Image (cartoon, grey):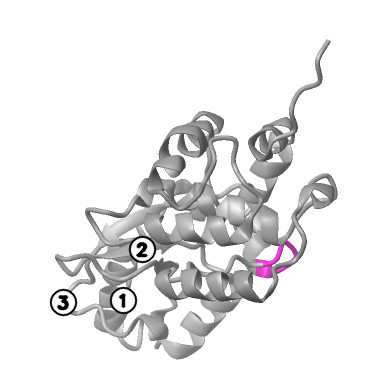
Amino acid sequence: MGETETTPLYLMFSHFSDVRERARILSIDIRRERFQIYCISEWPTFDVGWPQEGTLHLPIILQVKAVIFRDKPDGHSDQVPYILIWQDMIENPPPWLKPFLPPKAGPTEILALRKAEKETDYAPSAPLSGSPCARASSGTRRQTHRTAPPPNAGPADSTALPLRAMGPPDETGEQLMLYWPFSTSDLYNWKTQNAKFSDNPRDLIGLLDTVLFTHQPTWDDC
């Protein structure tokens, strides 16, 4: 009997429980079938050197990511979670993947990495598994939303909303937002920066309207 060829896609699928657990830690929702379709049928069509069996070569991964993060109609927002988890598995490899990784990038490859990173508006870095935010988001899915801020939303920093911008706005001015659950520090800052409801109910009601409009809470937030 012949041996099964150890390709990057085979490695990911043979350890898919680990890949899915990493995605859960990063609050990313992925599906095995879509992962396979994107790797075999979609990403090779981007003409950046992605093979159908996948790759562990970070410069190519970042070039695929740059294509995915393009503005409409050239971008592929539905593929964002899958390229993010693929990239994270390479940059923070588990023990079973380390022996298969290529040597560290040389000067030419570093230049390619920097070029790809400039072309991509980098997504927010995920919290470490031990951080309060990661513990609070256990079992929570990351969601992407196309949304424009309401007219009186106010500055986002003061309200610490759990939606973070991903990539540049599209041609209509709408921004792709990435769902990120509230952390305990977010809630503490919100409490200290805003007046009590009994002292200023109108401003608090307006703030809650903004949170509900931009956050679009799920049952996991309850």
Label number found at residue 72: none
Q: Residue furthest top?
A: 1
Label number found at residue 151: 3
Viewer-side residue, 169 vs 178 = 169
Q: Nearer the viewer, mark 2 or mark 1?
A: 2
Kindly identify the amino acid type of the residue bearing the numbered disc 1: Leu
List the residue tagged with mark 2.
Answer: 177
Which residue appears at 31% of the width and 54% of the height? 75
Q: Is residue 24 left or right of residue 120?
A: right
Label number found at residue 207: 1
Q: Is residue 136 left or right of residue 41?
A: right
The relative height of residue 178 versus residue 10 in the rendered view (above or below) is: below
Total marks in image:
3
Viewer-side residue, 178 vs 54 = 54
Q: Is residue 106 magenta?
A: no
The majority secondary structure of the magenta stretch comes to: loop
Q: Nearer the viewer, mark 1 or mark 3?
A: 3
Marks 2/1: CA–CA distance: 18 Å
Which residue appears at 22% of the width and 67% of the height? 148
Quadrant including the N terminus: top right
Marks 1/3: CA–CA distance: 12 Å
- Give the mark nearer the N terminus: 2 vs 1: 2
| Secondary element at image label 1 | helix
Magenta residues span 128-132
Residue 158: give x, y in percent of width and height.
Answer: 40, 86
Q: Is residue 131 magenta?
A: yes
Kindly identify the amino acid type of the residue bearing the numbered disc 2: Met
Which residue appears at 75% of the width and 33% of the height? 6
Residue 178: give x, y in percent of width and height.
Answer: 42, 61
| Secondary element at image label 2 | strand
Label 1: few (<14), some (14–19) or many (≥20) C-alpha neighbours in 10 Å: some
- Give the mark nearer the N terminus: 1 vs 3: 3
